[in-house]
């Protein structure tokens, strides 16, 4: 039977991280990207939006239909 | 008419205080950000001017001595409306 | 210490009573992922933090959550104020009315009282900040559920605003968690 095996092919070791390790980052840690302050709304606009920072605006689409996550 | 003017000043205070609060939180995790510090201080000056104007007309915005009672004859702090009643 | 500024951080101007909606929104007042839980969690955790950034952020977001607790209380108050007995009965809110009339109380709309069991202050900075990230996500999700349930634009507007604050708080706590990792890693070199 043919499984697509090729001579010299080594399956990736599932214990290795999927992407190369970033300098200073470790496994088993939750990292949030730090924000850099560049742009700001005007105070009036900021109050309407709920944040001073345009890059932190995350609008919500109200769910009208039945059913889960999507 | 007097209510509309009070609303207008209060809405401006709301906006500038919110902007300052946002920069306050940002600076708590970025204490070296000079630009943020400068913008924060600009907002503070604006807030001080707006609050002075509000308090001159309507009495203290904060309790416990953080603002003066402008009316010599009456304690204005307790006046209606309270924020949960209108805004 | 805390002093009180006589304004809401964001306006709440609800014109139509709705006891059913009031009961739902009460969860963000005294429920598991509500503003009171958030505030007490952060204000309790702040004492045991090892770096000034963490003390500052927990102090300040804990303070802001009190302002949100106030906003949610205002929403519940305005949704109940002026509701007739008929409207209260139609909403199935007889139990609430029996115990509270149209008043606000820190619990859920189904009568579950607020408890410190909703929060943790573990004394481990990494655990505490990771809990805080989860808390902000749970609050954000709860506001989305409330927005799904609401029809009145005067109700949806402050809910939307409070939801956006949770997004920002998540970002801020994430940055503090990063700083706590740096602190933890630097301790190895003493």
Image: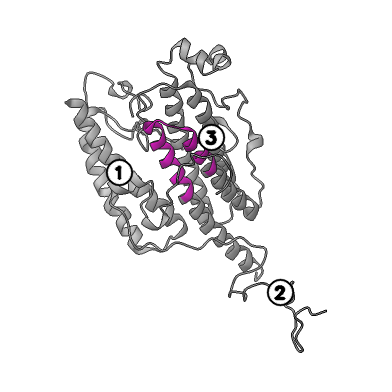
Magenta span includes C87? no
Res C101 visible? no
**Looking at the rendering, which quadrant does residue A30 occupy?**
bottom right
Looking at the rendered structure, which numbered label has been put on residue A16? 2
Q: Chain of mark 1?
A: B
| Residue positioned 35% across, 63% down in the render | A38
Chain letter of the residue beneath label 2 in the structure image: A
**How many residues crowd around disc 3 within 10 Å: few (fewer than 14), some, or many (20 or more)?**
many
| Distance from Cα at disc 3 to Cα at disc 1 | 24 Å
Q: Which residue is mark 1?
A: B15
- Residue B41's spot in the image, x, y percent? 30, 53
Could you tell me which secondary element the residue under label 3 belongs to?
helix
Relative placement, left or right, of C142 versus C156 is right
Of residue C125 and residue A59, the one placed in the foreground of this image is A59
Q: Position of residue A68 (x, y in %)?
A: 59, 44
- Tell whether label 2 touches label 3 (CB within 8 Å): no
| Segment colored magenta | C141-167
Q: Label 3 belongs to which residue?
A: C36
What residue do we see at 28% from left, 51% from top? A42
Question: In whole angstroms, how far apart are the C-alphas of marks 1 and 2?
Answer: 50 Å
Residue A36: quadrant of the picture: bottom left
Vertical placement of residue C45 versus C10, above or below: below
Report the quarter where the C terminus of chain C lies: bottom right
Residue B54 shows in this picture: yes
User: Crowding at label 2, few (<14), some or many (≥20) Cα neighbours within 10 Å?
Assistant: few
- Mark 1 on the same chain as mark 2: no
Do the residues at discs 3 and 2 belong to one chain? Answer: no
Q: Kindly state the secondary structure of the residue where label 2 is placed.
A: loop
Q: Which mark is residue C43?
A: none
Is there a contact, CB below 8 Å, between mark 1 and mark 2? Answer: no
Q: Position of residue C134 (x, y in %)?
A: 59, 48
């Amino acid at each position: 039977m043919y499984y697509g095996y090729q001579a010299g092919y080594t399956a990736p070791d599932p214990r290795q991280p999927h992407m190369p390790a970033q300098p200073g980052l470790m496994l088993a840690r939750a990292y949030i990207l730090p924000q850099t302050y560049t742009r700001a709304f005007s105070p009036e606009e900021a109050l309407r939006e709920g944040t001073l920072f345009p890059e932190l605006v995350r609008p919500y689409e109200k769910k009208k239909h039945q059913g889960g996550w999507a | 008419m007097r209510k509309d003017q009070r609303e207008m000043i209060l809405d401006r205070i709301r906006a500038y205080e919110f902007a300052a609060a946002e920069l306050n939180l940002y600076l708590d995790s970025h204490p070296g950000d000079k630009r943020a510090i400068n913008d924060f201080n600009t907002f503070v000056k604006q807030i001080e001017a707006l609050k002075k104007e509000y308090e001159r007309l309507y009495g203290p915005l904060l309790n416990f001595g953080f603002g003066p009672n402008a009316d010599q004859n009456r304690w204005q702090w307790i006046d209606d409306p309270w924020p949960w009643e209108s805004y | 210490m805390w002093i009180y500024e006589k304004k809401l951080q964001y306006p709440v101007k609800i014109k139509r009573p709705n006891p059913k909606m009031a009961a739902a929104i009460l969860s963000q007042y005294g429920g598991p992922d509500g503003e009171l839980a958030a505030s007490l969690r952060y204000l309790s955790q702040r004492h045991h933090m090892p770096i000034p950034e963490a003390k500052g952020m927990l102090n300040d977001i804990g303070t802001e959550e009190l302002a949100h607790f106030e906003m949610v209380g205002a929403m519940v108050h305005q949704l109940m104020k002026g509701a007739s007995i008929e409207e209260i009965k139609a909403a199935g809110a007889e139990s609430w009315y029996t115990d509270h009339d149209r008043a606000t109380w820190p619990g859920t709309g189904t009568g579950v009282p607020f408890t410190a069991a909703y929060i943790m202050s573990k004394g481990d900075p990494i655990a505490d900040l990771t809990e805080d990230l989860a808390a902000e996500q749970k609050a954000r999700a709860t506001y989305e559920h409330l927005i799904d349930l609401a029809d009145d634009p005067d109700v949806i507007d402050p809910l939307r605003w409070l939801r956006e604050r949770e997004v920002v708080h998540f970002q801020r706590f994430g940055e503090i968690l990063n700083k706590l990792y740096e602190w933890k890693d630097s301790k190895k070199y003493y």
